[in-house]
Amino acid sequence: MAELEFAEAVRIALQSLWANKLRSILTLLGVMIGVAAVIMVITLVNGANRFVATKVYGYGADVFTAAKQPAVVFSDADLERYNKRRNLTLDDYRDVAGKCRDCATTGAMIDQQGKVVYGNHSSSDTDVRGWTWTMPPIYNINIDRGRGFSPVDDAHHSRVAIIGYDIVDNQFGLDDPIGKELRVDGIQYVIIGVGERKGKTLGQSQDNWVAIPLTTYLNTYGSKQSLTIYARSRGVGDPLALASGEVRSILRARRHDAPGAEDSFSIDTNETFVGIWQRISSSFAAVFVSLAAISLVVGGIVIMNIMLVSVTERTREIGLRKALGARRDDVLLQFLIESATMSLVGGLMGVAGGIVFAKVITLAVGFPSDIEFWPVLLGLFAAAGVGIFFGIYPARKAARLDPIVALRSEM
């Protein structure tokens, strides 16, 4: 019997929604916007978290870096303090590469924006990288065509280059770039390889780069910039801690850091990068979810108002039900189910809208999105909860109606 009453209450709610389509849409708009915003934000944040973990900082859990300053600086005071540190140099890298027994491999990198010219085509915002010959595998870049750098290229300051696919697409077209010559900031290099296509990260291309041997870079641009030293441990967990600890000891000894004094460099792991990003993205998500909650509250108030109107419109119906034996609890439950059903329909529409908006953003600007089941459940639960919470007052008002007075009311 209870199941029949529940089904009847749901049917009445759906009929009311269908009979007053425009009013229903306007009534549920707040719930729809709130749920859509929650789903969209969580979907985009989940996508960004996964993307950052696998691609942006995806060198691998066994890779760590040593640099003049940490990857993320949170204040101007910290930035000023880090800028006073001495640069990491090629000799620092060579010392680490020669002494770190717990490192499976090491590399070093330095980069800046530069101009690349081939024939009549040019780009002025290309990332020009100085790499040791060991860097492509550490940087998670496979050589798609041609070859990578060799120890000979490093030792002889060779004027050779590896390029990204943006350079191939925009300047070479269908021509094979291997063996061709291009100019980087006015200096001529022979192309020996093309890195695999990486696509876009948060809307920005990862294929607009040119790499030259690190020694060639330093001879061309000078040594005023600080290197970033990369190292891969022989595993994660304890091997990573041992390798990063050994690199730290080597650099402290070489740079004459006093015992007990702060390091004159920063060591970051993949976990450090991802952890920082997740803290930032969690704060971002919390702010937007809070704003979405305001929309849900507004939607709940509108639902409560409509349910109060419904109680007034159906006063005789309520009196008739009570006269036929319906208890207060039966009337209360009926109106709560109707309110929750209305809100849940708005939640379903909001879930669909949130997913669609997230995917549109992904297609439009390349921002990653990742749909998971739990945000959908969260959105529907929140919608149903809003409907029940804001439906309590109208439901209680309906349940307390005197059946004799209700039957006397005008239709």
Image (cartoon, rainbow, N blue to C red):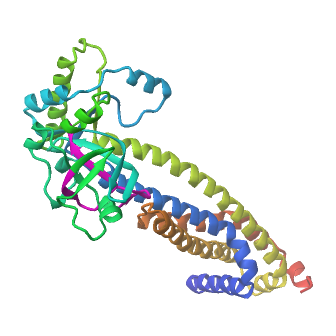
Q: Is residue 320 magenta?
A: no
Residue 108 seen: no
Q: Is residue 210 magenta?
A: yes
Residue placed most toward the observer, 384 or 398: 384
Residue placed most toward the observer, 181 or 318: 181
Give the quadrant of residue 147.
bottom left
Q: Position of residue 396 (x, y in %)?
A: 75, 68
Q: Residue furthest top?
A: 258
Residue appearing at x 47%, y 60% in the figure: 44
Q: Position of residue 213 (x, y in %)?
A: 19, 42
Q: Is residue 284 left or right of residue 263?
A: right
Give the quadrant of residue 302.
bottom right
> In what quadrant of the picture does the N terminus appear?
bottom right
**Residues drawn in magenta:** 190-214
Q: Residue furthest front?
A: 119
Residue 365, compared with residue 52, is above or below; it is below
> In what quadrant of the picture does the C terminus appear?
bottom right
